[in-house]
Amino acid sequence: MRSVGPKTARRYLCSLQQLSPWLEGRALSDIDGRLVAEIIRKRQRAGVTNATIRRDLTALSSVMSFAMLQDWIEANPVLPKLELAPEQRDPILLPSDRDIALVTERAPGMVGAMITAALKTGAREDELAKAKRVDIDHARKQITVIGKRNKLRVIDLAPFEGYEFFAALPAYVGKPFLFWHDKGAPYASFAPTFNKLMNRVEAWAKANGVEFRRFRFHHLRHRHAVDWLKAGGDIYTLQGRLGHTSVMTTEMYLQYLTPEEERVAKFGTAAKRAGVPTKSTTSVGGEVKG
């Protein structure tokens, strides 16, 4: 069984704590398909979403798989039951230009720059927070990021004028990080910082009668993906750009396209075989350009 990172380990521990009413005091051999079905049934009745149920059972399944590897049990009883809690993804609400601009304009330090970077690259929050100046290949206009499970991914910075943006980021002398605060320190806990920013913008908008819909930082990755496809990029290049293991994951963005845009995303055109857009369909805070 592969090792997991500290972040995943914390998430698994949290999930197992949620399942403790059913697991506490039981031997591994007592955890069977009937018990797993009971967990799913009772949590669904309690109003817990299938996504949360599956997340928690994934942690339990990981434990049971490890037990199998050690010859402590013969089978993993969790996997066959996961189909009882099918995950239904709601459509993603993409952040609008206006809402992004309201947040960016009020962002402290280099938080606004991270927002713009996510829009231009589709990189995740942690990937940007860990990025260093040496990760940029200026000759090839690329950046290497460390993604999930410590997998390296190279992102082309030529589209959406990404290289020009990254090359112009201010550096803190003697410190390596692209996005920093105070005396060049990285954003070690960026999520709380972004959440506080959202709270401030939401309060300001309410006090001033301005329409505003808050969004998560990860939604900027979704916005980038849709902008990429609408600009003529193909779905397979986008899959690699985002680091998706399967193109089926990337295909969720097709629902945001017109039939013609979807055809180009899947099959390309004579003019756009490479699938690499050069201009964004939007500008942060601006209007849709095409």
Image (cartoon, rainbow, N blue to C red):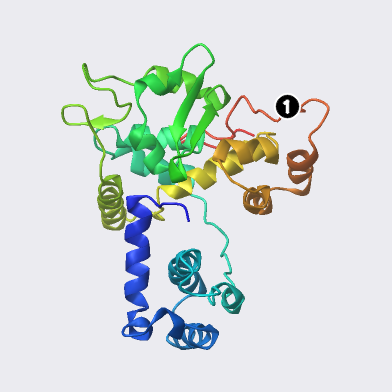
Q: Secondary structure at mark 1?
A: loop
Residue 267 in the figure: left or right of residue 72: right
> Quadrant location of the C terminus?
top right
Q: Quadrant of residue 184?
A: top left
Q: Quadrant of residue 188?
A: top left
**At x 58% / y 45%, what residue is drawn?**
244
**At x 50% / y 68%, what residue is drawn?**
68
Residue 141 in the figure: left or right of residue 176: right
| Mark 1 nearby-residue class (10 Å; few <14, some 14–19, many ≥20) | few
Q: Nearer the viewer, residue 64 or 58?
A: 64
Looking at the picture, how far across and down is residue 146, in whole percent? 43, 36
Q: How many marks?
A: 1
Q: Nearer the viewer, residue 228 or 203?
A: 228
Looking at the picture, how far across and down is residue 22, in whole percent? 38, 85
Outermost residue to the top: 139
In the displayed structure, 106 sits above or below 75; it is above
In the displayed structure, 190 sits above or below 173; it is below
Looking at the picture, how far across and down is residue 174, in whole percent? 21, 17
Q: What amino acid type is highlighted by mark number 1?
A: Ala
Outermost residue to the left: 183
Q: Quadrant of residue 214?
A: bottom left
Residue at numbered disc 1: 274
Looking at the picture, how far across and down is residue 123, in whole percent? 47, 38
**At x 39% / y 42%, what residue is drawn?**
125
